[in-house]
Image: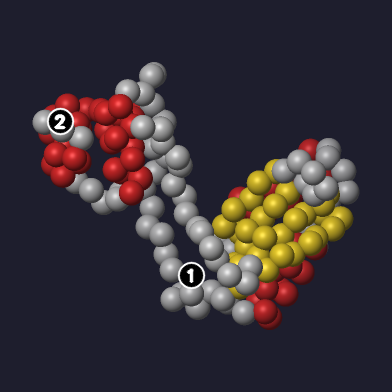
């Protein structure tokens, strides 16, 4: 599926405001409502839209610690990496996990209410079979945070 300018405009508006209704979206992209709705559904069905989420304010929720932790595995065999990957997928306080290149094997973004909770969480990561090292980098100031993808005009 090739995206045209209208598809990109629809994605841009949905990305900026996932609560936009079809009527308002159609107005913004200069389409009538039915063709706009069809395009929107086609973009969903084609997998361009993974879902719709609310962005929560972690500090208002009492989550003061945000850490980017590098994880090193003992080896790269599936029996070593699988327990860690399953733990990361199932753990709510790990908000992001990537397998990376470079000196470490994974980078996780984890959150905690305070340093005591952070220490507990790091300790639980250390206990996972296959994990051989951790390096935590605690964020002291958030400059930019978001989930928006760049869309060409």
The nearer-to-camera label among 1 and 2 is: 2
Determine crowd level at label 1: few under 14, some 14-19, many 20+ residues with C-alpha closer than 10 A: some
* Cα separation between marks 1 and 2: 37 Å
Q: Quadrant of residue 102?
A: top right
Seen at 30% across and 50% down, the residue is 17
Q: Secondary structure at mark 2?
A: loop
**Farthest residue in the left direction?**
32
Residue 22, above or below 130:
above
Residue 106, above or below 95:
above
The quadrant of the image that shows the N terminus is top left
Q: Position of residue 122 (x, y in %)?
A: 73, 67
Checking the image for residue 31, the label placed there is: 2
111 horizontally vs 34: left or right: right
Pick whichever, 122 or 12, lies toward us: 12
Pick whichever, 104 or 139, lies toward us: 139
Q: Which residue is mark 1?
A: 58
133 horizontally vs 118: left or right: right
Which badge, 1 or 2, is on the more N-terminal residue?
2
89 horizontally vs 61: left or right: right
Q: Position of residue 153 (x, y in %)?
A: 36, 32
Determine crowd level at label 2: few under 14, some 14-19, many 20+ residues with C-alpha closer than 10 A: some
Coloration mode? secondary structure
121 horizontally vs 104: left or right: left
Seen at 42% across and 64% down, the residue is 56
């Amino acid at each position: 599926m090739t995206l045209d300018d209208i598809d990109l405009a629809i994605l841009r508006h949905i990305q900026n405001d996932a609560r936009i209704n079809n009527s308002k979206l159609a107005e913004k992209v200069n389409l009538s409502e039915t063709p706009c709705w069809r395009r929107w559904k086609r973009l969903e069905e084609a997998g361009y839209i993974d879902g719709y989420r609310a962005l929560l304010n972690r500090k208002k929720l009492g989550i003061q610690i945000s850490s980017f932790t590098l994880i090193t595995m003992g080896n790269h065999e599936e029996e070593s990496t699988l327990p860690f990957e399953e733990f990361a997928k199932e753990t709510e306080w790990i908000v992001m996990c990537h397998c990376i290149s470079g000196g470490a094997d994974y980078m996780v973004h984890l959150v905690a209410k305070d340093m005591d909770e952070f220490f507990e969480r790091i300790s639980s990561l250390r206990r996972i079979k296959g994990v051989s090292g951790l390096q935590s980098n605690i964020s002291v100031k958030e400059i930019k945070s978001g989930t928006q993808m760049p869309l060409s005009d």
